[in-house]
């Protein structure tokens, strides 16, 4: 079965990220060897699941509902070994928990 990435909808509390490619050439033109053990830590958000909030009115002070402060198309930095890899059409996408997102890169 062929999976269309555009039709993937993450479950509550998860986000689908396409990792950014590492630069294989430096600014001065030196070719760098790729290290397969070094996972990328940045990527573009492709889809976002719903919030995990179970509070009726979400008025609790220490609520861990997990609202994501990013949107589809944003570039984010995430935990190095967080998430689950899913390979579709030779691209390894990441399903990450909201709490695995560390920062959003401002444009």
Image (cartoon, helix red, strand yellow):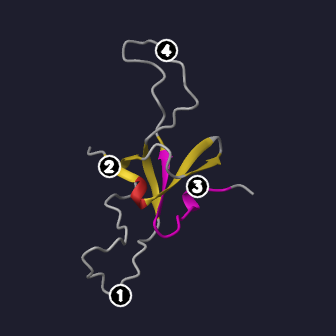
Locate residue 2 relative to residue 76 in the image: left or right: right
Question: Taking 87 as reference, is 58 above or below it?
Answer: below
Q: Would residue 73 be seen by someone viewing this image from the given angle?
A: no
Element assignment for label 4: loop
- Identify residue for label 4: 31
Residue 16 location, x and y as percent? 50, 56
Snapshot quadrant of residue 37? top right
Taking depth in this image into account, of 60 and 66 the one nearest to the observer is 60
User: Which corner quadrant holds the N terminus?
Assistant: bottom right
- Identify residue for label 3: 5
Inter-mark Cα distance, 1 to 2: 28 Å
| Camera-nearest label, 2 or 3 | 2
Taking depth in this image into account, of 85 and 106 the one nearest to the observer is 85
- Identify residue for label 1: 56
Q: Is residue 46 a member of the stretch shown in magenta?
A: no
Taking depth in this image into account, of 7 and 88 the one nearest to the observer is 88
Tell me which numbered mark, 2 or 4, is placed earlier along the sequence.
4
| Image disc number at residue 103 | 2
Give the magenta part as a residue range.
3-18
Inter-mark Cα distance, 3 to 1: 33 Å
Residue 42 location, x and y as percent? 42, 42
Snapshot quadrant of residue 50? bottom left
Tell me which numbered mark, 1 or 2, is placed earlier along the sequence.
1
Q: Residue at 58% of width from left, 30% of height from top?
A: 36
Tell me which numbered mark, 3 or 1, is placed earlier along the sequence.
3
């Amino acid at each position: 079965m062929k999976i269309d990435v555009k039709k993937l909808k993450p479950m509550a509390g998860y986000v689908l990220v396409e990792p950014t490619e590492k630069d294989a050439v430096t600014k001065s033109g030196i070719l760098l060897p790729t290290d397969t053990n070094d996972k990328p830590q940045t990527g573009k958000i492709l889809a976002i699941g719903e919030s995990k909030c179970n509070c009726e009115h979400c008025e609790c002070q220490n609520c861990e509902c997990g609202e994501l402060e990013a949107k589809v198309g944003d570039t984010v930095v995430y935990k190095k070994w967080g998430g689950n890899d899913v390979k579709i059409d030779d691209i390894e996408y990441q399903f990450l928990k909201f709490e695995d997102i560390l920062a959003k890169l401002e444009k």
